Image (cartoon, rainbow, N blue to C red):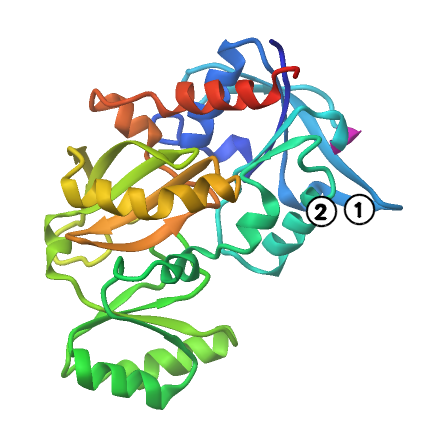
Amino acid sequence: MTLSVAIQMDPVEGINIDTDTTFFLMLEAQTRGHGLWVYTPDQLSLEDGRVMGRGRALNLRAVKDDHHATGVMEVRDMSEFDVVLMRQDPPFDMAYITATHFLERIHPKTLVVNDPAQVRNAPEKLFVTEFAGVQPPTLVTSDVDAIYDFRSRHGDMVLKPLYGGGGSGVVRLKPDDPNLDALLELHAMISREPVVCQKFIPAVSAGDKRILLIDGEPVGAINRIPAKDQVRSNLARGGRAEAVELTKRDLELCAIIGPQLKARGLLFVGIDVIGDYMTEINVTSPTGAQQLKRFGGADAAVLLWDRIETLRAPV
């Protein structure tokens, strides 16, 4: 089977081929003989009911600083593709949401991974709240009084933007930290959106586990260790990846959310687990696949393309 695959992503020129999951997924597709075509989210258009993209054919090679070659810029009807990978990074803002509306017009005739309507309906820090008993104590609000009440009950807490990504804007506030008012003021200047308050989990010092799931089934995990004196363990924020095994609790968490992921067409998902708690369900652009394989774990790219090819196979 040969598929035509479009990838909606941040500029391909800027990726780190040693760590980037999108590069890993694209390279596996190319190895299988699938044709690649790349564009950025701002190059997507809706005209007279047709979803159009302005992009370029793409050829990849695993060579540092010389990892891609592209064809001439062209405009194509996105419904002509077999598969679209929606892989741009958050923030999950109105531009991101608009792109899901556009791509919803062509799905499922063109298989969009992940299902754009379900991506829109599953913001990563809100989706997890649908599952009772998986999170630490968590508050999502713009109400300053509610935030102070939460702090009085739980003390040491983490404050983060609701629609951020990659650890951006995440801070830890100890019970006597005087900066809460100033941080809330800064957030209000930047955005009208609520914030997330979450009871601090000391187990984060031992790592923030990223578990990858394909079509609702866990395929493996990596552990992300925060840098010294840091609360953020994201690899983009200086966290260090290491090998880790799935625990009984990890498998319990996956069993709780897995059926919903499958039912919603969320084929490639990453969840974040600290200690016994799940903190986020990442449906936009999950990372960690290269590190998982490097540590001797499953090849998530192979497993994902196996599933995509099954879904695209003629009936």
Identify the main secondary structure in magenta.
strand
Q: Neighbour class for label 2 at 10 Å: few (<14), some, many (≥20)?
A: many
Residue 66 in view (yes/no): no
Is 75 magenta? The answer is yes
Q: Amino acid at mark 2?
A: Phe
Q: Residue at x 50, y 42 (%)?
A: 263
Check the image and report above or below for 167 versus 224. Answer: below
Q: Are marks 1 and 2 in contact (CB under 8 Å)?
A: yes
Query: Between marks 1 and 2, how big is the CA–CA gap?
Result: 7 Å
Q: Residue furthest bottom?
A: 145
Judged from the image, the secondary structure of the residue bearing numbered disc 1 is strand
Q: Relative to 135, say whether 65 is above or below.
A: above
Residue 46 is tagged as 1
Q: Position of residue 299 (x, y in %)?
A: 33, 21
Q: Quadrant of the C terminus?
A: top right
Quadrant occupied by the N terminus? top right
Q: Label 1 is placed on what type of residue? A: Leu
Write the residue at 54% across / 49% down: 119
Q: Residue at x 70, y 25 (%)?
A: 81
Please give the label number shown on residue 206: none
- Residue assigned mark 2: 102
- Find the magenta span and give its range: 74-78
